[in-house]
Image: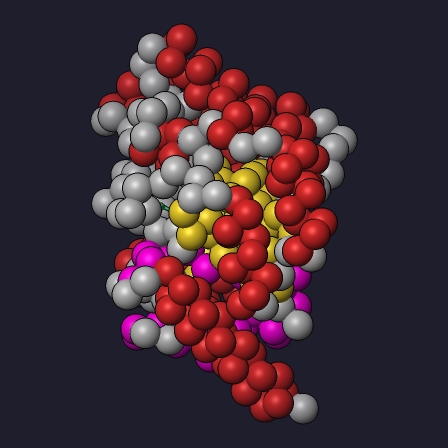
Amino acid sequence: MFRYAVCASPGAALSEPVLYRGSLEKVFGFAAGLGFDGVEIHLRDASEVDGALLAALSERSGVRVAAVATGLARRVDGLTMIDPDAGARRRCVERLKGHIDLAAEFGCPVVVGSTRGSLPSGEEGRTAYRRLVESVRELAQHIGDRNCSITFEAINRYENNYLNTAAETAAFLDDVGDARVGMLLDTYHMNIEEPDLCMAFWRQREKVSHIHLSENTRRFPGSGAVDFRRFLQTLQTADYRGWLSLECLPLPDEETAAGKGLAYMKMIEEMVREAAL
Ligand code: LER
Ligand code: MN
């Protein structure tokens, strides 16, 4: 059985692909009611949430904290690990260490992606890339031997101008060279960047530690053109053990998107498992 999570955030803008906004009580209540196994929490800063409250809500609802995501640190506060200003780079790395400390309390991965920024051209770009490698190594070292990891996301070219495909991201992970850093694949970004989603996943299956699900339109699974049946078949063949996290726009509204998206994925999973018998 795959494990499904839903993305939520206390303060994200409506344009962000998270399904639930607002109080954590509401988020965990909805997630439990709909049958999700986990909640992926998107935060600009770890101080936005109280770790003890999060632990109590998770315990009470039986819904796990699936991941802590960091992209809002860039999209709201403009922080990147490649900023030409050394002070701004440091603020970004320290901010992400806060996310790691929170995630480590729950033994879950930290999603890192948007804070890589976009590279300038030429020598400056090569310097910025080296800074990114160094920063991600520093973050991995910050994890130490705690039960946590970084899952680094391949993101489409319109949001970040490098590390767009699974293969490019795999080469970056080789440069980082730390087993605590794996790969996140997101079907929305893959649909833009990859000729074949299943092949892209299959080639990097040893590295993939987390998956975001949404349609080509970034709406809930089952409302668009992504072939989730073939995708789940591929995950099953690869014996994928990470989370499947619904990272979709709250359209037409959050409950419809979360409810229909999860029901669709579970139905597809059942079909795939029965076909394999
Ligand atoms: C973050 O997981 C992501 O996929 C970004 O595209 C959010 O804008
Ligand atoms: Mn994503």
Q: Position of residue 184 (x, y in %)?
A: 50, 50
Q: Position of residue 244 (x, y in %)?
A: 54, 61
Which quadrant of the structure image shows residue 71?
A: top left
Position of residue 6 in the picture relative to residue 123 (left or right): right
In the displayed structure, 1 sits above or below 6; it is below
Q: Which residues are magenta?
A: 224-251
Q: Is residue 250 magenta?
A: yes
Residue at 42% x, 73% y is: 260
Check the image and tell me how it is coloured: secondary structure
Q: Is residue 121 magenta?
A: no
Residue at 74% x, 33% y is: 146
Image quarter of the C terminus: bottom right
Pick whichever, 14 or 148, lies toward us.
Answer: 14
In the displayed structure, 80 sits above or below 65; it is above
Which quadrant of the structure image shows residue 130?
A: top left
Residue at the extreme right of the image, as rendered: 145
Q: Position of residue 107 (x, y in %)?
A: 70, 42
Residue at 25% x, 26% y is: 120
Residue at 32% x, 74% y is: 223
Image quarter of the N terminus: bottom right
Pick whichever, 38 or 154, lies toward us.
Answer: 38
Q: Is residue 80 visible from the viewing direction of this image?
A: yes
